Image (cartoon, rainbow, N blue to C red):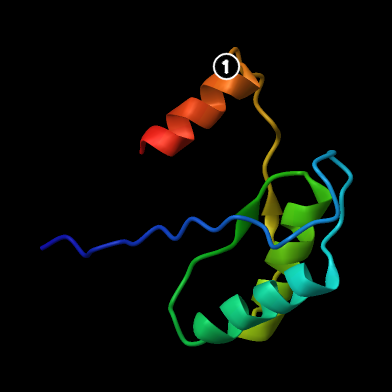
Amino acid sequence: MVGTKLLYLVRHGESGGDTECSELTETGRHQAALLGERLRGVPSTGIHHSPLARAAQTAAIVGARRGNSKKGRRRQRQPSNISPDQATSISTNW
């Protein structure tokens, strides 16, 4: 019998802008902390995040609140041939 595996997808907390180096706002840090508390006790094998500062901050806060001693694993950004307009329309159609 194969066990069930769950994948939790989380968007970063509120950030100060849309640039790659935007950091979390106070509200974003609070959102990440609440999520970490909510996920406390949920078994996981790791936290993966993009190289963006706001994603790394969110992962670190969530991990700390969950009691994880390991750092999140950063994923390299993959080149994309999808324009921002297409990405928006794709995400809103899901």
- Residue 89: where, in percent of width, then height? 48, 27
Amino acid of disc 1: Ile
**Vertical arrangement, residue 94 with respect to residue 43, above or below:** above
Question: SS of the residue at dot 1?
Answer: loop
Q: Is residue 30 visible?
A: yes
**Vertical arrangement, residue 51 with respect to residue 80, above or below:** below
- Residue with the most extreme top position: 81
Quadrant of the rendering where the N terminus is positioned: bottom left
- Residue 30: where, in percent of width, then height? 73, 78
**Exactly how many numbered labels are in the figure?**
1
Decide which of 25, 60 is in the foreground and name it: 25
x 21%, y 65%: residue: 3
**Vertical arrangement, residue 6 with respect to residue 94, above or below:** below
x 67%, y 57%: residue: 12
Q: Is residue 44 left or right of residue 15?
A: left
Decide which of 65, 74 is in the foreground and name it: 65
Q: Is residue 69 visible?
A: no
Q: Is residue 47 left or right of residue 38?
A: right
Q: Quadrant of the rendered structure where residue 32 is?
A: bottom right
Decide which of 5, 54 is in the foreground and name it: 54
Q: Is residue 75 left or right of residue 22?
A: left
- Residue 92: where, in percent of width, then height? 44, 37
Classed neighbour count for the residue bearing mark 1: other residues with Cα under 10 Å, few (<14), some (14–19), many (≥20): few
Q: Quadrant of the rendered structure where residue 50 is?
A: top right
Q: Which residue is mark 1?
A: 82
Decide which of 57, 16 is in the foreground and name it: 16
x 31%, y 61%: residue: 5
Quadrant of the rendering where the C terminus is positioned: top left
